Image (cartoon, helix red, strand yellow):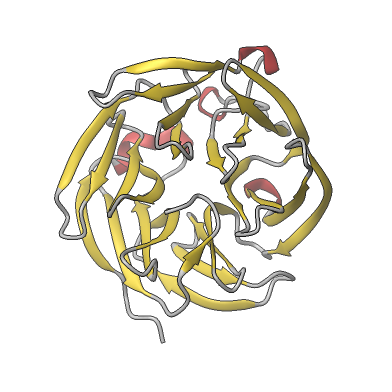
Amino acid sequence: MTPDPAVVLDGLSFPESTRWHDGRLWLCDWAARTILAVAPDGEAEPIARVESFPFSIDWLPDGRLLVVSAADRAVLSVDADGTLSRWADLSGLGPFPPGNEIVIDALGRIYVNGGGFDPRAGGAPAPGTIALVSEGAARTVADGIAFGNGMAITPDGATLIVAESHACRLSAFDIDPDGGLSGRRVWAALGEDPPDGICIDAERAVWYADVPHGHCVRVAEGGEVLQRVTADRGCFACMLGGPQRSSLYIAARQWHGMAALERGAGSGRLLVCEVEVPGAGYPAA
């Protein structure tokens, strides 16, 4: 039985895009426009300020930190002093280019999803895309994504899994030699659960965070529920980290809908609990 999660850090504005890197849990506090690196004891270091909502992070194999910034319609690089530089332009991918989530594999292939419409402006829902990004360039490799959220790549680098929140499913693609995506299929139908952030473990099961139901669920390919962790507020992202990658970190926050974002200000928490199967694949530790 999974224990109740413990609080690592409290008082966050809107924690999202959790990553484990270099011995710390990194996250994007969207409302505070800040990237934070959090030690296991809860000590938080501000790394950079990103004037965007949303934004998310991942690392190239050479150690450079990249940020996908919806406001900039770009992928930015982060210098050691927190300075941001434009690394790749996404504006040519349409009026609502992808800018929600990023994942990078061992070969340095960069995938960014999102787009289709602006939910903060009250736009009608429309399908989004996944783009393959390289320095200075980007191209669409999948479309028809029903509000793309978390993404993860299997340890062998062969499969990309994306959370489609508006379709309550995880979808999978084969990754082609040139980085393109093909062979689209439903990896797991999730009933009434709209998945947000996701991560993969060593048994190729996926953990997904669910905002309206306030839980994180471990699910096998095909949809069998293997484990569940419940929180007292919406779960926006999850990541397996810690020395053995067996600590499930959860970004959680009170949620009152897109039209009432300020009502949850200060209710953001980074939670953690121990699980048996360690993390694997990408985003990498």
Q: Position of residue 97 (x, y in %)?
A: 63, 22
127 horizontally vs 85: left or right: right
Residue drawn where x is 36% and y is 54% of the image: 252
| Residue 273 is at least partly visible in this image | yes
Instruction: Determine the image quadrant of residue 93.
Output: top right
| Residue 94 is at least partly visible in this image | no
Q: Considering only vertical position in the picture, is 110 above or below 185? A: above
Q: Nearer the viewer, residue 146 or 278?
A: 278
Residue drawn where x is 35% and y is 18% of the image: 84
Quadrant of image for the N terminus = bottom left
Q: Position of residue 240 (x, y in %)?
A: 42, 62
Outermost residue toward the bottom?
Answer: 1
Quadrant of image for the C terminus = bottom left
52 horizontally vs 124: left or right: left
Q: Considering only vertical position in the picture, is 36 above or below 267? A: above
Q: Position of residue 37 (x, y in %)?
A: 25, 44
Q: Position of residue 116 (x, y in %)?
A: 68, 27
Outermost residue toward the front?
Answer: 62
Residue drawn where x is 72% and y is 63% of the image: 189
Outermost residue toward the right?
Answer: 183
Q: Nearer the viewer, residue 163 or 155?
A: 155
